[in-house]
Image: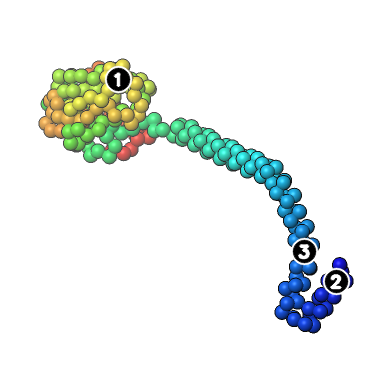
Amino acid sequence: MALAATGALAFATIGVPAMASATNSPAVVVGPVVSGSSADAAQEAAAPAIRAAQARQQAAARQAAVKQAAAQQAAARAATVKQAAAAAPARAQWSAPIPGAALSEAYGVVDSEYAAGYHTGTDFAVDTGTAVLAVGDGTVVSAGWQSSYGNTVVIELADGHYALYAHLSGFAVTVGQQVQAGDLVARSGDTGNSTGPHLHFEIRISDDYGAVVDPLAFLRGKGVSDF
Ligand SMILES: [Zn+2]
């Protein structure tokens, strides 16, 4: 076989060079082709098992990826909750009744027009309907009409003082309701003995007329200054 092939190769090389590679190449490549075919056949036979193994690996990889993604999401959620918990203590404990509102009459101004002979609160000049906020955490002890005060809300604050909001146009709370600093409690107005839209705001040491302190000094003492 080897001889014959060599002879053919020698003859072909001399005779027809173009044919030489044509006739020769099958003889040379026969081996690899045959063995290749059998290898292919072996691979073919093993293919289902290999494919199954590959599929199992891919499925495992996908499961691992899904697990990792879920773990990452859970970690992210936990971090967000942690951040929220850490941020919670930073909630303002006190607020201005109407942050940034302009003062129109100070506390203590002597005027015989007032029953007490002086102004028992601080007035803020704001349009009717302006949001009025709880100045601190507390409980609503009244929300209704109080003669010259018009529509009035009183909140008993956590520190024992009372915050009074007068001349309101509407209520956002009811008696007994717990509020936190900054919560909406009412809308400002022009009800009762009022000469124009404004909020009359008092801080009292008891829920009685005239038992008042300077409301802005009180709030400044709580760290509030946006008025
Ligand atoms: Zn007033």
Q: Secondary structure at mark 2?
A: helix
Q: Earlier in the sequence, mark 1 or mark 3?
A: 3
Kindly report the distance in space between the C-alpha atoms of the residues bearing marks 1 and 3: 100 Å
Number of numbered labels in the structure image: 3
Q: Earlier in the sequence, mark 2 or mark 1?
A: 2
Determine which of the numbered discs, if any, sits on residue 4 in the image.
Answer: 2
Badge 2 local density, few (<14 within 10 Å), some, or many (20+)? few
Where on the picture, by quarter, is residue 100? top left
Q: Is residue 218 visible?
A: no
The amino acid marked with disc number 2 is Ala
What percent of the width, then of the height, locates residue 65? Answer: 59, 41
The amino acid marked with disc number 1 is Val
Q: Is mark 2 within 8 Å of ligand 1?
A: no
What percent of the width, then of the height, locates residue 225? Answer: 33, 38
**Left or right: where 35 falls relative to 67:** right
Residue nearer the viewer, 46 or 99: 46
Instruction: Give me the residue at 77% from left, 59% from top.
Output: 34
Determine which of the numbered discs, if any, sits on residue 140 in the image.
Answer: 1
Residue at the spot of label 3: 30
Outermost bottom residue: 14
What percent of the width, then of the height, locates residue 138? Answer: 35, 22
Q: Is residue 177 above or below residue 66?
A: above
Determine which of the numbered discs, if any, sits on residue 163 in the image.
Answer: none
Q: Is mark 3 within 8 Å of ligand 1?
A: no
